[in-house]
Amino acid sequence: MSQVAIDVSMVPDKPVGVGKYLLELIKNINSLPRSFELNLYTRQNDFDRWNAVVGHKDVLNNKDVLNNKVVVHNIVPSNKAIRVGYENLILGRIVNSSNIFHSPHYSVPLNLKIPLIVNIHDLIFFENSTYHQFAKAVYFRSQIKQAIKKADVIICGTEYIKQKIQKRFNPKGQIEVVPYGVNIQEFEPDEIKSVEDQALLTQLKIVKPYILFVGTIEPRKKVDDLIKAYRMLVETKKIDSKMSLILVGKYGWKYDSVKELIENNKVGSVVHLGYIPQKYIGPLMRESVCVVYPSETEGFGLPVLEAMAAKTVVVTTSNSVMEYFAKDAGYYFESGNLEDLASTIEKTFVKGDRNDRILAGYETAKQFGWENSAKLHLALYEKMLT
């Protein structure tokens, strides 16, 4: 039986973005018929999570197996620094027994001898390198260049990113656009969820009404601009001071300015919940007045798609990948322009075409199911195996 190897060792304990993508991808691929065995390479301390995703434990061989078509190899060192060296120097020799290797996060083994699929989620390390730590930017620019040079197939989430890759690198391998997804059933509102949502909000000590942000707090997300725009709206009485700003997401790096704004805020109410389990994201989005995602640059922007599936108004950045897929569903502002951000948020409180945008967003979101994304990945694997 043919084998497809996927490196999932980079998925953090608290997954966001690419981590969510991989968990949903594997879960959905696992539920679809296929001609090959899927080999997952995980961190040594991450066996139980992937065991829950793909099936049951083969105690005798200490592996996870489902219908003899999924095997989890929990062999990648858990220490991050050691893991990077292991992936570059050792993993290649192990996965060379497979027919295809899929690297979802730029890292490619130096001694790989089988066909390679690599994800290029964005080009932020090249276009906006100051939004990352210097050493990290240098390392990943090198990794991305090598990955593009070696890849037989490059996967990206939108035509928007595909065009950027082609323009900058002119790669030898083909570029396949495979959109990321959203679990519509998880996010769309209904009467039963409405009751449950109130209970979850009570657990979080959240009182409506509120504006919501979901994402890692780091410079490119422009959370500091969001807080300042919110304060402008309260100070000018464009919104009631009882309207809170709720921030969901862990601190990434260079977050001091945001933390200071939160701690010293005396206008309205700015609440940072930190990282919270996925089960709370849908309820928070459904019950919010609007979801604001002010990130300057992204590879996709999953929170925008999730908010659209939750039938919630979305405010996000103009001339971005988010505008590319959200189209008529979103309200857009110029990045870095606080007055524009504040006035755009204010627009969402006026009935106008609010309902039309909500419905447009929901219809768009329904086109981005994880199952469809998994089917496109499978078709790509099967084509390369023939």
Image: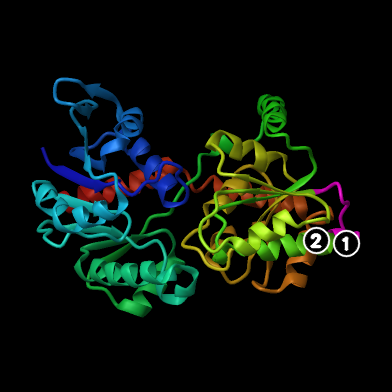
**Left of 343 or right of it: where is 336?**
left
Q: Secondary structure at mark 1?
A: helix
Would you name the residue on which mark 1 appears? 235
Residue type at mark 2 is Arg
List x then y, in percent, for residue 206. Answer: 73, 37
> Residue extending furthest top?
59
Q: Which residues are magenta?
A: 234-243
Note whether residue 288 is visible. yes
In the depicted structure, whether residue 202 falls above or below residue 21:
above
List x then y, in percent, for residue 227. Answer: 72, 60
Q: Are marks 1 and 2 in contact (CB under 8 Å)?
A: yes
Residue type at mark 1 is Glu
- Decide whether the magenta segment is chiefly helix, strand or loop: loop
**Which circle marks residue 231 in the picture?**
2
**Left of 320 or right of it: where is 357?**
right
Magenta region includes residue 383: no
Magenta region includes residue 238: yes
**Residue at left offset 9%, top offset 52%:** 93
Q: Residues within 10 Å of mark 2 (few under 14, many from 20)?
A: many
Note whether residue 294 is visible. no
Q: What is the quadrant of the N terminus in the image?
A: top left
